[in-house]
Amino acid sequence: MGMNYYWYKNKPCPACGRNDEPLHVGKSSAGWVFSLHIVPEENINDFEDWLKKFDIKGSYIENEDGEKKTREEMIDTITKRKHPDGLLRHDLGGICLKHGKGTWDCLEGKFS
């Protein structure tokens, strides 16, 4: 079981509530490094590219339960991970493109 996170470029329309499609930031799963979603067609190839997105004025982050997360909370979720038995990493190849410099791996493709 895990938690997916999404980045929205703009706040919803105040009149109708509609919003642009979000970008999937990644998934947090207990015992694993954060699965950071890499989206090359959006020029997102590593953690630093996500930081640039998080800094866009008016953008925001929500988890799959609709709870808003601050930039700092999202960064902590990605970079300050611990588990008493250590964190598992994804196997390179397939959807895991590379291991991050910290407690995340860079994955491409579909997440569930």
Image (cartoon, helix red, strand yellow):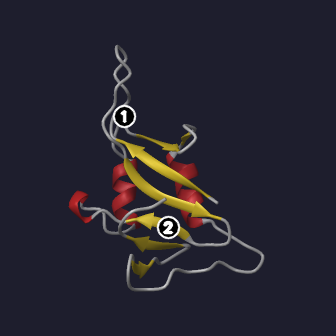
Q: Is residue 83 left or right of residue 25?
A: right
Taking the view exactly as shown, the residue that stands out farthest to the bottom is 92
Within 10 Å of disc 2 (Cα), the crowding (few <14, some 14-19, many 20+) is many
* Three-letter code for the amino acid on which mark 2 is drawn: Ser
| Looking at the image, residue 56 lies above or below residue 75 | above
| Looking at the image, residue 38 lies above or below residue 87 | above
Secondary element type, mark 1: loop
Q: Which mark is residue 58?
A: 1
Quadrant containing the N terminus is bottom right
Taking the view exactly as shown, the residue that stands out farthest to the top is 15
Q: For this rendering, which residue is in front, 98 or 70?
A: 98
Q: Residue at x 44, y 48 (%)?
A: 6
Question: What is the CA distance from the residue labelled 1 to the residue labelled 2?
Answer: 25 Å
The disc, 1 or 2, on the residue closer to the chain's N-terminal end is: 2
Q: Which mark is residue 35?
A: 2
Q: Position of residue 103 (x, y in %)?
A: 56, 73
Q: Residue at x 25, y 65 (%)?
A: 40
The image quarter in which residue 63 lies: top right
Q: Residue at x 59, y 58 (%)?
A: 76
Q: Is residue 74 left or right of residue 88?
A: left
